[in-house]
């Protein structure tokens, strides 16, 4: 997201994927930079952003506006007829404000349900949705929602009708058996091997919630999940989770 050349290449690679498709994006680093310029402090707990009213305004501007519309424009330039959406648009993703437990994350949303009708209408019309990591609570409030969660919930919603592959693109070429060796990609993870990899410490930390999200999506009907590098989103690289 922060490198214009890498982003341009990603959009070209995305355009080359055949069939109906949806792109989900984040933008946390850009939001942090914009907040700093506005004199708004960024607060994080366990890697999660605390979203008070001021920060909600920032992430709405950055995710739903600056980042989303630049991606839409970039896709139009490579022949993809795209439309930018938050969860509030077409009621695509409804959520509730996360209850306060050990930490009050503020205006952060946990998804309740996705609207298949809206997404299907767009896809059948040949329009590619570009989803920003924002949802709504049905009472007029926008909520900041993790992009991985948006991707999983969108995939689960589409799986009611479509055969869905969910691809997580990040900075590594897949799930690694050795975090310091990019050539140590684990090509396939099954429920049985996942338990072994967690037990022996091969998979740990932030990768666990990502794979847990993947299995939640699979349980809801997603065919497979692929975790791969942002320059290899053709479905032929990375780690397949089945």
Image: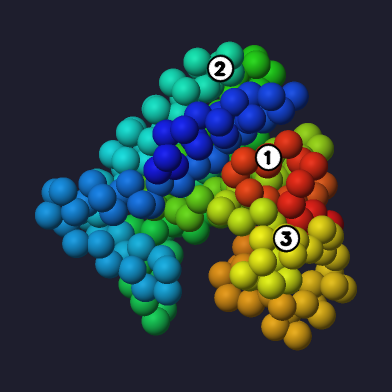
Foreground mark, 3 or 1, reads: 3
Q: Give coordinates of residue 147: x percent, y percent.
A: 51, 50
Helix, strand or loop at mark 1? loop
Question: N-terminal of the two: label 3 or label 1?
Answer: 3
Foreground mark, 2 or 3, reads: 3
The residue under label 3 is 183
The structure residue drawn at horizontal position 26% and vertical position 50%, both measured from the top left corner, is 33
Q: Is residue 29 left or right of residue 242?
A: left
Q: In this rendering, does residue 23 appear at all?
A: yes
Relative to 162, does residue 50 appear above or below in the rendering?
below
The structure residue drawn at horizontal position 62% and vertical position 41%, both measured from the top left corner, is 231
Q: Is residue 81 left or right of residue 38?
A: right
Helix, strand or loop at mark 3? loop
Q: In this rendering, does residue 117 appear at all?
A: no
The outermost residue toward the bottom is 200
The residue under label 1 is 233
- Residue closer to the observer: 99 or 39: 39
- Residue closer to the observer: 12 or 54: 12
Q: Give coordinates of residue 182: x percent, y percent.
A: 67, 61
The structure residue drawn at horizontal position 71% and vertical position 78%, both measured from the top left corner, is 202
Distance of mark 2 from mark 1, alpha carbons? 16 Å
Residues packed near mark 2 inside 10 Å, few (<14), some (14 to 19) or many (20 plus) = some
Relative to 188, does residue 178 appear above or below in the rendering?
below
Q: Give coordinates of residue 161: x percent, y percent.
A: 78, 35
Q: Give coordinates of residue 106: x percent, y percent.
A: 32, 64
**Residues at marks 3 and 1 touching, judged by CB atoms closer than 8 Å:** no
Distance of mark 3 from mark 1, alpha carbons? 17 Å
Helix, strand or loop at mark 2? loop
The residue under label 2 is 78
């Amino acid at each position: 997201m922060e490198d214009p050349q890498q982003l341009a290449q990603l959009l070209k690679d995305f355009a080359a994927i055949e069939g109906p498709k949806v792109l989900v994006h984040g933008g946390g680093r850009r939001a942090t930079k914009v907040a700093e310029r506005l004199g708004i402090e960024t607060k994080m707990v366990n890697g999660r952003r605390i979203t008070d009213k001021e920060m909600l305004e920032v992430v709405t501007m950055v995710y739903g506006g600056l980042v989303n519309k630049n991606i839409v424009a970039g896709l139009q330039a490579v022949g993809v007829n795209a439309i930018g959406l938050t969860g509030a648009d077409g009621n695509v993703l409804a959520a509730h404000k996360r209850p306060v437990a050990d930490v009050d994350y503020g205006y952060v949303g946990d998804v309740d349900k996705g609207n298949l009708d809206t997404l299907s209408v767009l896809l059948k019309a040949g329009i590619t949705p570009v989803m920003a990591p924002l949802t709504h609570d049905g009472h007029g409030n926008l909520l900041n929602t993790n992009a991985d969660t948006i991707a999983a919930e969108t995939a689960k919603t589409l799986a009611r009708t479509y055969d869905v592959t969910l691809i997580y693109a990040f900075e590594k070429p897949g799930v690694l058996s050795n975090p310091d060796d990019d050539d140590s990609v684990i090509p396939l993870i099954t429920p049985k091997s996942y338990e072994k990899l967690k037990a022996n410490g091969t998979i740990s930390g932030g990768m666990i919630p990502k794979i847990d999200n993947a299995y939640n999506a699979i349980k809801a009907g997603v065919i497979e999940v692929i975790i791969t590098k942002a320059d290899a989103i053709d479905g032929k690289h990375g780690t397949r989770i089945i």
